[in-house]
Image (spheres, helix red, strand yellow):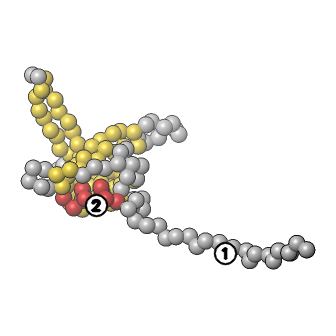
């Protein structure tokens, strides 16, 4: 079984790109806080979450750096060789619709706060 679920924050504004075939894709850099031990902050783990199609479009449209997300997906790995040196990269692939926004979307308008009513102006006395 290959499944993972995380709560994380975006470390960069997401950017949408397209494959040669035109499919939307976004590689999201996220931070997953490590569990505190005896109140000590232990930092975070940094991962890439790959989102495809409508999920990628929605995240790029409505989310920004610092926003909190819940991600359901699976682990994947790219392997390649460059200059005779093998490389690999592990990442999380989000399931279709597998990203939930835990902060209000940044593209949505917040309800406007009513302006406080101005006090009625006091009549001024005319100079004589």
Q: Is residue 22 visible?
A: yes
| Picture residue at 24% right of the left edge, 56% below the top | 56
Looking at marks 1 and 2 on the same chain, the residue that comes earlier in the sequence is marked by: 2
User: Is 16 left, or right, of 84 in this rendering?
Assistant: right
Pick the front one: 68 or 119: 119
Give the image quarter of residue 101: bottom left
In the rendered image, the residue lying farthest to the top is 84
Q: Name the residue beneath numbered marker 2.
A: 58
10 Å neighbourhood of mark 1: few (<14), some, or many (≥20)? few
| Picture residue at 25% right of the left edge, 59% below the top | 57
User: Is 90 left, or right, of 20 in this rendering?
Assistant: right
Q: Is residue 117 above or below residue 64?
A: below
Percent x, y of residue 18: 16, 52
Give the image quarter of residue 48: top left
Count the labels in the image.
2
Q: Name the residue beneath numbered marker 1.
A: 117
Q: Is residue 38 above or below residue 124?
A: above
| Picture residue at 56% right of the left edge, 70% below the top | 113
Q: Is residue 10 visible?
A: no
Pick the front one: 126 or 1: 126
Q: Which mark is residue 38?
A: none
Mark 1: secondary structure: loop
Q: Is residue 60 above or below residue 35?
A: below
Percent x, y of residue 15: 28, 49
Mark 2: secondary structure: helix
10 Å neighbourhood of mark 2: few (<14), some, or many (≥20)? some
């Amino acid at each position: 079984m290959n499944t993972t679920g995380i709560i994380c924050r975006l470390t960069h504004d997401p950017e949408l790109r397209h494959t040669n075939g035109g499919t939307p894709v976004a590689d999201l850099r996220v931070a997953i806080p490590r569990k505190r031990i005896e109140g000590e902050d232990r930092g975070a783990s940094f991962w890439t979450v790959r989102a495809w199609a409508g999920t990628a479009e929605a995240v790029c449209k409505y989310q920004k750096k610092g926003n909190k997300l819940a991600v359901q997906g699976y682990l994947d790995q790219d392997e390649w060789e460059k200059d005779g040196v093998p490389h690999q990269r592990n990442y999380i692939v989000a399931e279709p619709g597998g990203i939930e926004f835990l902060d209000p979307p940044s593209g949505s308008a917040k309800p406007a706060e009513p302006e406080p009513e101005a006090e009625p102006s006091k009549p001024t006395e005319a100079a004589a």
